[in-house]
Amino acid sequence: MSKALQRRPDMTARASVLILACMLIFIPRWAPAADGQHDRALEERITSLEKQVAYLKSRSIKVTDLEERITVIKREYGNYTLWLPKIQDAKSDLERDSLSRETGMMRQVIGLSIANLESELTVKIGGIRRIDALYILTSIFGVGFVLSITFYTIWMYLKRR
């Protein structure tokens, strides 16, 4: 046997140890987060929605429908947080499993509602920022045009004198 073939089992063992080490390091990052982390993330997303709606209000945009949808999401989140202790109080495994599936679905519904509202708000805020940029550019070009006409008029007046 050649030396290359004799080293091959040693290389596969090293490679498998390296892959195992990488999996042990990176799997906790890929694993789903605990319920408490999901709950905090939902709360943070709801507060960011409220901040975005407040920004739209400051720009005098009609946001009553968005505010109503945020209150519905808050109500759903409140119901979700009320269901969480029921899982721990469940007496049988079947009941506990059923309640955990139900709360998981509630969390998904809330997350989808938040994602839908976030996408609408980003579109609206993006449009407002583009309109602001156009307004600023139009103002700059308008002032530049007026100044150039004024300069040209003064220059022609001085030239004819």
Image: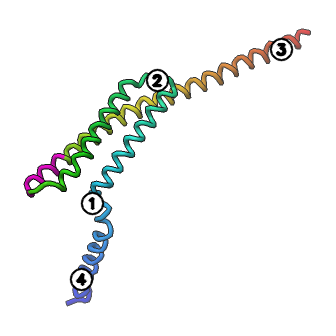
Residue 65 appears left or right of 76: right
Give neighbour class at mark 4: few <14, some 14-19, many 20+ (Cα, 10 Å).
few
User: Quick one: label 1 or label 3, which is nearer the N terminus?
Assistant: 1
User: Quick one: label 4 or label 1, which is nearer the N terminus?
Assistant: 4
Residue ID for mark 1? 31
* Secondary element at tag 2: loop
Q: Where is the N terminus found, in terms of image quarters?
A: bottom left
User: Quick one: label 2 or label 1, which is nearer the N terminus?
Assistant: 1
Asked whether the residues under the numbered discs 2 and 1 touch, taking CB atoms below 8 Å apart as contact, a structural biologist would say no
Residue ID for mark 3? 154
Name the amino acid type tagged 4.
Arg
Residue 150 appears left or right of 110: right
Task: Say if residue 159 shows up in the picture.
Answer: yes
Name the amino acid type tagged 2.
Ile
Name the amino acid type tagged 1.
Ala
Residue ID for mark 2? 61
User: Quick one: label 3 or label 2, which is nearer the N terminus?
Assistant: 2
Q: Quadrant of residue 18?
A: bottom left
What residue is shown at x 7% (from left), y 54% (from top)? Answer: 94
Foreground: disc 2 or disc 4: 2
The magenta segment is: 92-102
What residue is shown at x 37% (from left), y 36% (from top)? Answer: 118
Foreground: disc 4 or disc 1: 1
User: Quick one: label 2 or label 4, which is nearer the N terminus?
Assistant: 4
Mark pair 4, 1: CA separation: 33 Å
Q: Where is residue 87 in the image (x, y as percent from the top left)?
A: 18, 53
